[in-house]
Image (spheres, grey):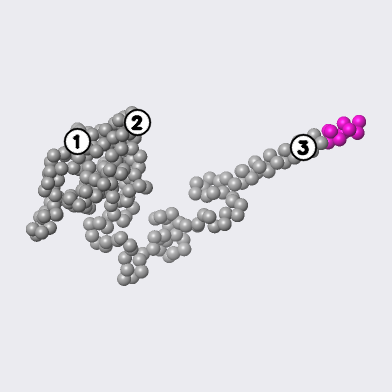
């Protein structure tokens, strides 16, 4: 009898231990979760792995103007910033949403700040070879290795009816958010690099044609600057 009672007590103790262990695990899991997406929940000794930084362009209660992004010290400019120039747009947040209206607005409003010069097009060609050629192909016919070797659906040809007249702003929007099977390239390419790629892609939209500079660039130029405008056939 005594042995049976000991066995029963052992079983009860084991069951109690399992119950308590399960209960505390569930309690720990529940209290560690919350509905704040950016919160990691309760952490044991985080050792400052997560900095309490504010999101870009979010409000900051520590400053009277509530701006998280602070203005430069008087008499200085931010690194890479060219104030009051056509390149200032390279440093501002992207203003259009990832929807059909944003796509159309980008196509209507966004203009490439870089001239269609041989230097810019060559830089765009190098970037295209790194980030675009595997799907779109060397000449923009949608015959890259992902299509020919991987047997994935081909993207439309740049000089085809669907993309031949695609505005540069819509190209930028597609690089920003992705389009159809193409994912976003915002994390791989700077704003400047995206515009350079677009300059090269424009030569693929019109193969064999002359790459012309913008009207603003040509009008009023002296002869030295005009020599930098692309006048060769691609």
Q: Quadrant of the N terminus?
A: top right
Q: Position of residue 40 (x, y in %)?
A: 54, 49
Residue drawn at the location 59% of the way across and 51% of the way down: 43
Q: Earlier in the sequence, mark 3 or mark 2?
A: 3
Is 4 a magenta residue?
yes
Relative to the observer, which residue lies in front, 89 or 2? 2
How far apart, in angstroms, are the residues tagged by discs 1 and 2? 23 Å
Residue drawn at the location 51% of the way across and 47% of the way down: 36
**Which residue in the protein does label 2 denote?**
150
Q: Is residue 110 visible?
A: no
Q: Position of residue 127 (x, y in %)?
A: 28, 46
Q: Name the element at disc 3.
A: helix
How far apart, in angstroms, are the residues tagged by discs 3 and 2? 56 Å
Q: Which residues are magenta?
A: 1-9
Left or right of 16, for residue 225: left
Relative to the observer, which residue lies in front, 47 or 98? 47
Q: Residue furthest bottom?
A: 75
User: For residue 60, which quarter of the picture?
Assistant: bottom left
Relative to the observer, which residue lies in front, 65 or 108? 108
Q: Name the element at disc 1.
A: loop
């Amino acid at each position: 009898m005594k042995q049976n009672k000991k066995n029963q007590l052992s079983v009860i103790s084991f069951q109690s231990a399992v119950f308590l262990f399960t209960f505390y695990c569930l309690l720990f899991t529940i209290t560690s979760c919350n509905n704040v997406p950016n919160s990691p929940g309760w952490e044991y000794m985080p050792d400052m792995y997560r900095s309490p930084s504010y999101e870009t362009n979010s409000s900051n209660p520590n400053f009277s103007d509530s701006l998280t992004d602070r203005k430069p010290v008087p008499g200085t400019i931010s690194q890479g910033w060219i104030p009051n120039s056509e390149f200032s747009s390279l440093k501002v947040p992207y203003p259009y949403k990832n929807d059909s209206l944003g796509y159309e607005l980008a196509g209507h409003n966004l203009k490439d700040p870089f001239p269609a010069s041989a230097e810019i097009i060559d830089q765009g060609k190098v970037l295209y070879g790194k980030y675009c050629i595997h799907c779109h192909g060397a000449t923009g016919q949608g015959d890259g290795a992902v299509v020919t070797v991987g047997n994935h659906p081909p993207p439309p040809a740049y000089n085809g009816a669907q993309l031949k007249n695609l505005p540069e702003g819509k190209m930028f929007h597609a690089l920003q958010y992705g389009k159809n099977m193409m994912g976003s390239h915002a994390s791989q390419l700077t704003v400047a690099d995206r515009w350079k790629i677009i300059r090269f892609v424009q030569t693929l939209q019109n193969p064999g044609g002359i790459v012309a500079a913008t009207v603003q660039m040509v009008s009023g130029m002296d002869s030295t600057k005009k020599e930098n405008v692309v006048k060769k056939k691609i």
